[in-house]
Amino acid sequence: MISSQKGEALEAAREAAEDAGYNVTAHNANKGDAEPSGKWKVCFEEIGYGTVDYGAVREGALCPEKDGGPLAWPRIPDVTGKVYAMAVKALAEVGIDEDDIDVESAYKDVSVSAADVEGDADGYKVCFQSPSAGKDVKPATEAKLTLVEGDSCPSGKGTYKDRKNDPDYTPPPPPAASGSSSTGGSGSSGGSGGTAQWNGQCELTSPAGNCYQAGQFCANKHLGMQTHNSAGRIIYCKQRADGQRWNYS
C-alpha cells in the first residue's frame, strides 16, 4: 500500500502513486472550480483498491478543515521590535523568502543597505513593516522592513536622526552678546571662520527665511557658494560623500 502523501506536491504524490501501480485522480480541495496543477499541495487522499484520489490546494495556501472548505492563506506576522535575523526567520515560516524582503532606513539622513544588514543581522531592529501584520501571504508576496541600527526607533518613518539635517530645522537663536555693541567700521568679515565686523545678516537663507547651518543639506544652486551661519561663521556649500552639505571649510 502506498504511504500517505499529505503535505507533498501533487506532482510528486501522483508520481509516487503511479510508480506503486495506482490509478490517480485529483480534485480541488477548496471551494472553487480551478483544476489542480503539479505544484499544488495534497491535503486529502482517498485510497481505494488500486486507485487514489488526492484533494489539493494552491501552492502556499493552507489546507481547509475539511475537503471542499474555503481557501485560506498564512498571515503576515508582526515583526516590529524584532532584530532583522528574527524577523527574517518569522517571515520565512509563512513562506516569504529573504530574497523577497527589501530593507530601508527609518531615517532620511542615514543609509541602510542589504549588505549592511546581512553583515550584522542581529544589530538592526525592525521599526516598521509592510505589509502589515495579519495580511494574507499569497504567492509572490514581498515584504519591506524599515530598520535602525541599534535599539532606538523614531516615532515615524522619514524623520531625521540629526535634526540639523532637516532643511526645515530652525536653530535656536544665538545667545545675546554681553557688553556694548561693536563700533562702526568699513571692510568685509575677517578670516574664513571668524566673525569680525559681521553685520549680523546671513547672505543666503532657507525658503523659511532661516540661516543655514553646517551639516545641513545645500541646494544645487548654492554649490560652491558661501554664507554666514546664525553665529556669524562662514560656511561653504560643497559636494561630500553623503551629499551636498554646508561645511566650515
Image (cartoon, rainbow, N blue to C red):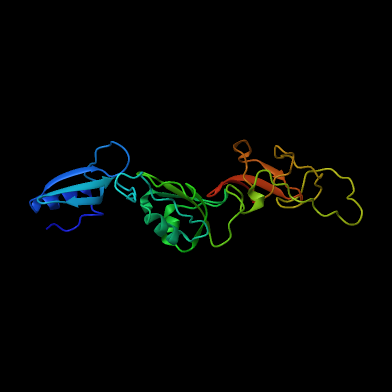
The quarter of the rendered structure image containing the N terminus is: bottom left
Residue lying furthest front in this view? Answer: 49
Q: Is residue 186 visible?
A: yes
Along the line of sight, the residue nearer the viewer: 24 or 165: 24
Q: Is residue 40 visible?
A: no
Q: Position of residue 211 (x, y in %)?
A: 73, 44
Along the line of sight, the residue nearer the viewer: 16 or 108: 16
Left or right: 195, with 44 as reference point: right
Along the line of sight, the residue nearer the viewer: 152 or 185: 152
Question: What is the tally of numbered marks visible in this picture?
Answer: 0
Q: Position of residue 237 (x, y in %)?
A: 63, 44
Q: Residue at x 76, y 48 (%)?
A: 230
Q: Position of residue 140 (x, y in %)?
A: 36, 44
Q: Residue at x 82, y 55 (%)?
A: 175
Residue lying furthest left in this view? Answer: 21
Where residue 222 sits, quadrant-wise, is top right
Left or right: 128, with 2 as reference point: right
Where residue 37 sits, quadrant-wise, is top left
Along the line of sight, the residue nearer the viewer: 7 or 52: 52
Q: Position of residue 41 (x, y in %)?
A: 26, 49
Q: Residue at x 66, y 51 (%)?
A: 163
Residue lying furthest bottom in this view? Answer: 122
Left or right: 112, with 74 as reference point: right
Left or right: 197, with 93 as reference point: right
